[in-house]
Image: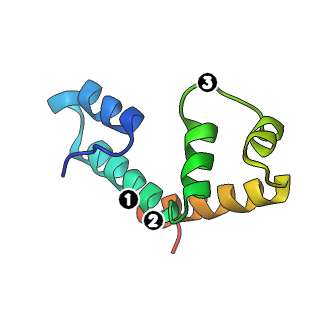
Amino acid sequence: MEVVAYPEVKKKVIELGDAAPDEVKAWLLQMETAFNQFCTTPEKSEFLRLKFWGKRISNNEICNLMGVKKHRLITWKNELLTLVGKNVGMIE
């Protein structure tokens, strides 16, 4: 499976190349799966983009840009981290 949806993940897989252990590549693919599971709305996709890709900005700036309250960002972050943890086998 090729990683195409998230440029930073794809970039990392390409950088790792054939020398990277298969476990690392599998872990990155599981992260992308979690991202896809998380991005069920345009707002969540925008949160993921603003929070983790490109220029780093604060939660307050994200709230202002998106017009949401800070507790929503915390809820989304926890949801995303739970999905990543489940997909990589760290939590059940």
35 or 40: nearer the viewer: 40
Which residue appears at 83% of the width and 59% of the height?
71
* Up/down of 19 relative to 35, above or below: above
Q: What residue does disc 1 label?
A: 33
x, y percentage for residue 82? Answer: 58, 64
- The residue pinned by badge 3 equals 55
* Image position of 21 (left or right of 50): left
Foreground tag (3 vs 1): 3
Compared with 61, 82 (above or below) is below
Residue for badge 2: 37
How busy is the neighbourhood of tag 1: few (under 14 within 10 Å), some, or many (20 plus)?
some
Q: Are marks 3 and 1 in contact (CB under 8 Å)?
A: no
Q: Does the CB distance between marks 3 and 2 fall below 8 Å?
A: no
Q: Residues within 10 Å of mark 2 (few under 14, many from 20)?
A: few
**In the rendered structure, which amino acid carries the disc numbered 2?**
Gln
Q: Amino acid at mark 3?
A: Lys
Q: Residue at x 42, y 52 (%)?
A: 31
Q: Vertical placement of 3 versus 14: above or below?
A: below
Q: How is the image coloured?
A: rainbow
Give how far across and how far down residue 49 sits, in percent. Answer: 55, 41
Q: CA distance from mark 3 to mark 1?
A: 23 Å
Choose top left, top right, bottom left or bottom right for residue 11: top left
- Label 1 secondary element: helix
**Mark 3, residues whose alpha carbon is within 10 Å: few (<14), some, or many (≥20)?**
few
What's the mark number on residue 19? none
Q: Residue at x 79, y 54 (%)?
A: 68
Asked whether 81 or 40 is in front, the reply is: 40
Label 3 vs 2, first from the N-terminus: 2
Callout 2 touching callout 1 (CB < 8 Å): yes
- 47 or 74, which is in the foreground? 47
